[in-house]
Image: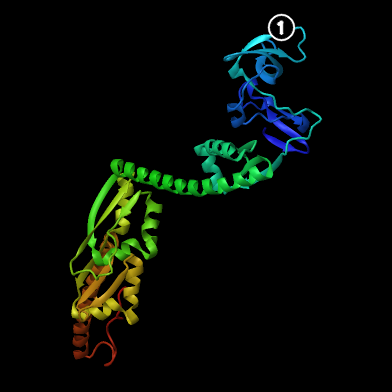
Amino acid sequence: LVDIKDGQCLVRFESLGDTSDDSLLEWVSWEHIRQCPSEVEAASFIAREGMTVEVRVQAQPDEPYSWWEAQVTQVRGEFLKVRYYGWDQVDDNWIELESVRSATGLQPNEHALPLFKHEYALTEKMHKWLLKQGGHGILADILKRSELFTARIDSGRGVVVLLGGERPAHKARLMLDVHVKHQRDLQRLAEQRDSLLIEKERAETGVRDEFEIARELLGLVIGKSGRHVLHVKQVTGVYQIDTPVSSSAPPKEGELAKVVIIGPTREAVAKAREMIDFAEEEVDVPPSAAGFLAGQGNRSLLELQERAGVVRASLVKNNRKLKLVGTRLALEQALLLVELELSYLQTRSEESAELQRLSRQARALGLGPARGGAVGGAVGMGR
């Protein structure tokens, strides 16, 4: 029994061939359906002479086996002699007991079977899981215990179709609740297992790089809620970026932390390291250059951060040091810019001193600008 609709039953004749062949499906009226004896009835079946039974036999050698009504005329151990109803020209046959069952007793004029159609909704994820894992074993167990006629997963929709009476359907729903709950747990465990197997394979076959950074800079590697690590993995395609578990205790001075990157290629791993290998540098600042490097309102330092890509740029230790924090690539760019700016500061200072010397000489000879005319340049990095 596959489906029911408007007093009709869709059945598949399993004895005719491949049970997945839709050409074996046929709509028939309810009144032509009879229920097979239950397993309990089959186990307790005892054949007696004169009893009406059903015999599984071929009407013709080229036809499939079917169940035919017959009367038992003799019983000898595991063999029965039967006479088929409606086959007057056929002699009585000896049949093995295992090919015989009790007659269902339902005639076409009697009431139809109590058939109802119920649907048990599944989530999309559980629907795919049951189809992939073969939920038919679960449904076979439900059929056996609930006494439904049919329980099948609709491959096109996320439902389990239940065909049978109200009480068996209620029992099947209760069983499905339990099965789905535990299948959900098994699905989660399977996903975790598969993920671990993938990570294990990648760790064994992928390109690996390890390096150390100051523990106090781990927050920059990870980012808020792990966003920087996730961004780096998405951009570079590396499999893993492993860092030590964060601790509530403040890092000790000089304490280092190991970072591990695993990826598909050396290029991907190198790119990922370039994005997370943070460091700190301090540059000596001549006393006369502090204001020049900072600029008005630290504007020049902010420009340095933006142009070089460093995370922080600040004057420390009474403006005697320029502290830079960023990736090693960003630090390299920042140091180059600072070196260029300081070299221009030196050149400007020398040029200004020479210009002032010449101005003094010109005034001594009564030449040059009037006294009070300024000679020099603006202060600020990059001007």
Kind of residue at badge 1 = Asp
Q: Which of the 4 image quarters holds residue 223? A: bottom left
Q: Residue at x 19, y 90 (%)?
A: 364
Q: Between residue 188 and residue 261, name the one nearer to us.
A: 188
Of 194 and 28, which appears nearest the observer?
28
Q: Residues within 10 Å of mark 1 (few under 14, many from 20)?
A: few
In this rendering, is residue 13 above or below 147? above
User: In the rendered view, would you say 166 is above or below 363?
Assistant: above
Q: Which residue is mark 1?
A: 91
- Splitting the image into 4 quarters, where does residue 361 fall? bottom left
Q: Is residue 6 left or right of 201 when viewed as pictured?
A: right
Which residue corresponds to the image point at 33% horizontal and 47% vertical from the top-left? 263
Visible residue check, residue 227: yes
Q: Position of residue 374 (x, y in %)?
A: 28, 87
Name the quadrant containing residue 247: bottom left
Q: Quadrant of the C terminus?
A: bottom left
User: Horizontal placement of 55 versus 295: left or right?
Assistant: right
Q: Is residue 311 above or below residue 240?
A: below
The image shows residue 329 at horizontal and vertical percentages of 28, 59
